[in-house]
Image: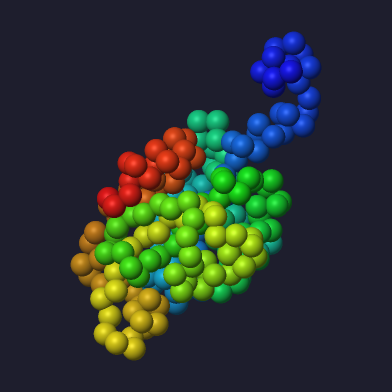
Amino acid sequence: MCRLLKKWLGFGNKTDQNEEDNMKKFLIVGLGNIGEKYANTRHNIGFKILDYLANKEAISFETLKLGDVVSLKIKGRTLVLMKPNTFMNLSGKAVKYWLEKEKVPLENLLVVTDDLNLPFGTLRLKTKGSDGGHNGLKDIQDKLQTTKYNRFRFGISDSFSKGRQVDYVLGEWNDDENSKLDERLNVSVELIKSFALAGVNNTMNQFNGK
């Protein structure tokens, strides 16, 4: 008997309802390093985007196990926003813990991260891929034992001289980037909402490359 018919006849059970509820729940993870000295660095764009979303929705993060967490409801969907407090290269531990705790399906996970291979402010949503040398993604891949999870890459460009990659990534935004950042953060928030409401494929078609 199909689920809708069972529900109509009154035979739906609690397990079915829980599964439906879980499909409407999303874990949005912003990657970054904890501490004030990292707050405005390029590597912390994941934190910055989630902070921007929380600020727009007038909600505040709470420090819980392995991360700062807050939930947001949008049109019947629940978005659990999480910033790992494990430092970047141990992000996978926090992601795995909160996926399991909130019973979020893997396909409803979205990891927000910086990307050196994209021009500044370019947005790219992908459903799978390599870690690209990114320590946070590398640990998530290791802990989840898969490369098939959604990741939202925010371009920070590769405008650094040879041997200066670490300084660049852990450096702060320059004046030109800062002047454009608010608009890019706003579009990033719309991408995250679209991911939960319209699905990954529609969101990729609408936002990738913009």
Q: Residue at x 44, y 62 (%)?
A: 113
Q: Considering only vertical position in the picture, is 58 above or below 66? A: above
Q: Position of residue 29 (x, y in %)?
A: 53, 56
Q: Position of residue 13 (x, y in %)?
A: 78, 25
Front one among 90 and 206: 206
Q: Is residue 199 left or right of residue 161?
A: right
Whether residue 117 is visible to the viewer of this picture, yes or no, is yes
Q: Is residue 55 left or right of residue 2?
A: left
Front one among 91 and 60: 91
Front one among 188 and 4: 4
Total marks drawn? 0
Q: Residue at x 46, y 38 (%)?
A: 199
Whether residue 87 is visible to the viewer of this picture, yes or no, is no
Q: Residue furthest bottom?
A: 163
**Which image quadrant for residue 155?**
bottom left
Q: Residue furthest top?
A: 9
Q: Position of residue 12 (x, y in %)?
A: 76, 21
Q: Considering only vertical position in the picture, is 150 above or below 17? A: below
Q: Is residue 135 left or right of residue 185?
A: right
- Give the color scheme: rainbow, by chain, secondary structure or one colour: rainbow
Q: Residue at x 21, y 67 (%)?
A: 176
Q: Position of residue 51 (x, y in %)?
A: 45, 56
